[in-house]
Image: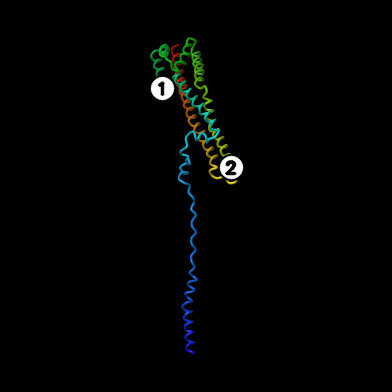
Amino acid sequence: MYSSCQKKISVLFLSIMILGPMAMTLQSEEPAPTPAKEETTQQPPPGDQAEEKTPESDSVFDLLIKGGYTMIGLGLISTIIAGFALERFFFFRRNKLQTKGYYERIRGALDSGGIAGLEKEIESDDLFLSKILREGLRRKAHGRQEVEKAIETSATVETGKLERGLNLLSNLGNLAPLLGFFGTVVGMRASFLQFVEKAAPTARDLAVGVEEALITTAAGLFIAMPTYLIYNLFIYNIDSVTIELERCTAAVLNALEDEK
């Protein structure tokens, strides 16, 4: 009886020793949680992406429309500037403002034939400087001072014709960037109004006003830069004529003094 009981205890002990660690192992090896499936962002169909217009595909007309009503004023200013610049260009060509080598030509005529030789040299000349000198030489019989006064009066009148309207060109060139900056303010206001109309405006909503602001600013500067260049080219031509006229006038007056 004792041996049978001892056998039962031995079997129970062996069962505990074998099955116990197995049970603990099974409890510790809990199944790992399955990773959640990543939410895939739904991509728009290829057709919708193709329909979206990129900024590079915008035409000039599209940019003008996006610039808002300010572009109307900028367009008017640029039209006036272009028309006036062309008018001044052809006016300068008609008046023949060539100055290269003119003083040397006058100096040579005076050295070879004096005042009479100069009158013969510029008699049929239609250059701008020759017209002014002819007006002065008509008063040579009244003395040096009368000739000088006649040249100064004629030069003032003719130079005034050249400078006619250049102040308008300068003012329009200065007005263009100011009007562009006005469009910048309008565009930025349109962007900030999105916060009033919508609780949480998107970047696309704000970009409309910002784009308008940038377009008007760029347009104003684009108009002002060539206008500034054209204005200074006209002034440079007038200054060149004035300097050459002063040299020729001094030579004529000195020749009159020598003939006395």
Say which of 203 and 45 sits in front: 45
Say which of 1 and 79 sits in front: 1
Q: Mark 2 and mark 1: span between their CA atoms? A: 62 Å
Say which of 154 and 64 sits in front: 64
Image quarter for residue 197? top right
Residue 182 picture location, percent across and down: 56, 35
Element on which disc 1 rests: loop
| Amino acid at dot 1 | Lys
Residue 125 picture location, percent across and down: 42, 15
**In the orientation shown, which residue stands out farthest toward the right?**
196
**In the orientation shown, which residue stands out farthest toward the bottom?**
1
Badge 2: few (under 14), some or many (20 or more) residues near its Cα, within 10 Å? some
Q: Is residue 7 above or below residue 176?
A: below
x 53%, y 43%: residue: 204
Image quarter for residue 206? top right
Badge 1: few (under 14), some or many (20 or more) residues near its Cα, within 10 Å? few
Residue 21 picture location, percent across and down: 47, 75
Say which of 244 and 17 sits in front: 17
Q: Earlier in the sequence, mark 2 or mark 1?
A: 1
Residue 50 picture location, percent across and down: 45, 42
| Amino acid at dot 2 | Gln
Element on which disc 2 rests: helix
Label 1 belongs to which residue?
100
Q: Is residue 112 above or below residue 223?
A: above
**In the orientation shown, which residue stands out farthest toward the top?**
141
| Quadrant in the picture for the C terminus | top left
x 50%, y 13%: residue: 146
- Closer to us: mark 2 or mark 1? 2
Mark drawn on residue 194:
2
